[in-house]
Image (cartoon, rainbow, N blue to C red):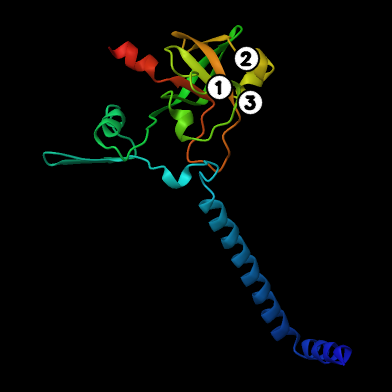
């Protein structure tokens, strides 16, 4: 019986070939588009979900009005973080991240331009899930002129993760910064990617 159904359907398709091609082609295109949309939405919704505390994390934006001038940005003044922790008990902790983008790094006789650099508080690892392959996350960024680098950069500049620990790197032809930690590469589904995370206390100490 099932064989007869297939034979009848096949004969119908052959009899109306143009109509069949249009319908089957339309169905195939529709299914393909639906699958692509599903994959795209799934990927977008997966961003930052690698963080264990993702459901309790919030990014602080700036929405300022100075006279007739309005200012809106995804960043906010550096003093804002500590002030929120001090004045609002509901804020458990905060971590400030300052993205500089590019950074010059000296490697032997070469000076290389790296594109994923920034500064961060020592509390960065209390907020974000950034598994550390070497070093202590509680102290890695606690001192001035210290830095945590990614696994990829550790292998690029020192050959291995263990070899990178305790070494110093000359950055921007100005600072000599000690590597105090190596983290696993940040997943692609993240709203930020950093290969060089320098201690923010370095900037604060330099400004004081």
Residue at 12% across / 42% down in the picture? 68
Decide which of tag 1 and tag 2 comes sooner along the chain.
1
Neighbor class of circle 3 (other Cα within 10 Å; few <14, some 14-19, many 20+) is some
Location of residue 112 with respect to 189 vertically, above or below = above
The C terminus lies in which quarter of the figure?
top left
Q: Secondary structure at mark 1?
A: strand
Which quarter of the figure has residue 50? top right
The image shows residue 150 at horizontal and vertical percentages of 58, 25
Which quarter of the figure has residue 2? bottom right
For the residues labelled 3 and 1, say whether their Cβ atoms are less than 8 Å apart.
no
Residue at 69% across / 85% down in the picture? 19
Residue on which disc 2 sits: 164
The N terminus lies in which quarter of the figure?
bottom right
For the residues labelled 1 and 2, say whether their Cβ atoms are less than 8 Å apart.
yes
Q: Which mark is residue 152?
A: 3
Cα–Cα gap, marks 2 and 3: 11 Å
Give the camera-side residue of 145 and 152. Answer: 145
Q: Secondary structure at mark 2?
A: helix
Give the camera-side residue of 117 and 9. Answer: 117
Residue on which disc 1 sits: 149
Give the camera-side residue of 87 and 50. Answer: 87
């Amino acid at each position: 019986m099932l064989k007869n159904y297939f034979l009848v359907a096949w004969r119908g398709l052959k009899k109306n070939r143009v109509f069949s091609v249009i319908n089957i082609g339309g169905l195939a295109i529709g299914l393909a588009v639906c699958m692509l949309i599903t994959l795209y939405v799934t990927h977008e919704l997966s961003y930052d979900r690698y963080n264990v505390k993702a459901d309790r994390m919030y990014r602080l934006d700036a929405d300022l009005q100075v006279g007739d001038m309005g200012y809106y940005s995804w960043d906010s003044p550096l003093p804002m973080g500590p002030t929120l922790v001090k004045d609002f008990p509901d804020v458990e902790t905060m971590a400030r991240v300052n993205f500089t983008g590019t950074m010059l790094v000296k490697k032997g006789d070469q000076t290389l331009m790296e594109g994923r650099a920034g500064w961060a508080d020592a509390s960065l690892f209390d907020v974000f899930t950034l598994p550390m392959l070497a070093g202590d996350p509680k102290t890695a960024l606690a001192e001035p002129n210290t830095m945590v680098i990614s696994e990829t950069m550790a292998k690029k500049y020192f050959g291995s993760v263990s070899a990178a620990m305790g070494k110093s790197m000359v950055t921007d032809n100005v600072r000599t910064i000690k590597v105090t930690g190596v983290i696993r590469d940040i997943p692609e589904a993240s709203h930020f990617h950093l290969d060089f995370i320098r201690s923010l206390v370095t900037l604060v100490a330099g400004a004081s």
